[in-house]
Amino acid sequence: MTIISTLSVGVWQSMHLQQAETRRASRQAVVRQLAEAGLDHARAAHASRRPLPLGREYPLGEGYYIVRKQVREDGATRMISLGLLRDGGVVTASQELSEVWHVE
């Protein structure tokens, strides 16, 4: 009986860990897509010469993204997008992506 209980607990723990890893990987894929959407939004605004309000939350699907801008010493602009997922006000996953623009 003890052996069966031990095996059952081991199987349950393994399944629980596998499910947790699957959820983590899924959340990371979503926040990466959110961060990519933020960079796409910045590119589109730049191409159309429309101002993009920076630092605000742009909701999309399950989460949101925030776009920021840094001007480097060499004059290039670094666009930064942060994709976030929240659960009850707590950030459960985030991903930051950036790209550098050399604007003439």
Image (cartoon, grey):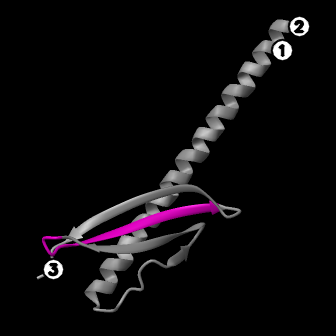
Q: Position of residue 18 (x, y in %)?
A: 62, 34
The label nearer to you, 1 versus 3, is 3
Residue at the spot 60% in from the left edge and 66% down from the top edge:
62
Q: Quadrant of the C terminus?
A: bottom left
Majority secondary structure of the magenta segment?
strand
Between 102 and 25, the one lying in front of the other is 102
Q: Which residues are magenta?
A: 73-86
Which corner quadrant of the image does residue 49 belong to?
Answer: bottom left
Residue at the spot 78% in from the left edge and 13% down from the top edge:
6
Q: Position of residue 47 (x, y in %)?
A: 26, 86
Assess whether mark 2 and mark 1 are in contact (beta carbons under 8 angstroms): yes
Tell me if mark 3 has few (under 14), some (14-19) or many (20+) residues whose alpha carbon lies within 10 angstroms of its own: few
Q: Residue furthest right?
A: 1
Q: Residues under labels 3 and 2: Cα distance?
A: 72 Å
The label nearer to you, 3 versus 2, is 3
- Which comes sooner in the sequence, label 3 or label 2? 2
Q: Position of residue 60 (x, y in %)?
A: 54, 73
Q: Residues under labels 1 and 3: Cα distance?
A: 66 Å
Say which residue label 3 marks: 103
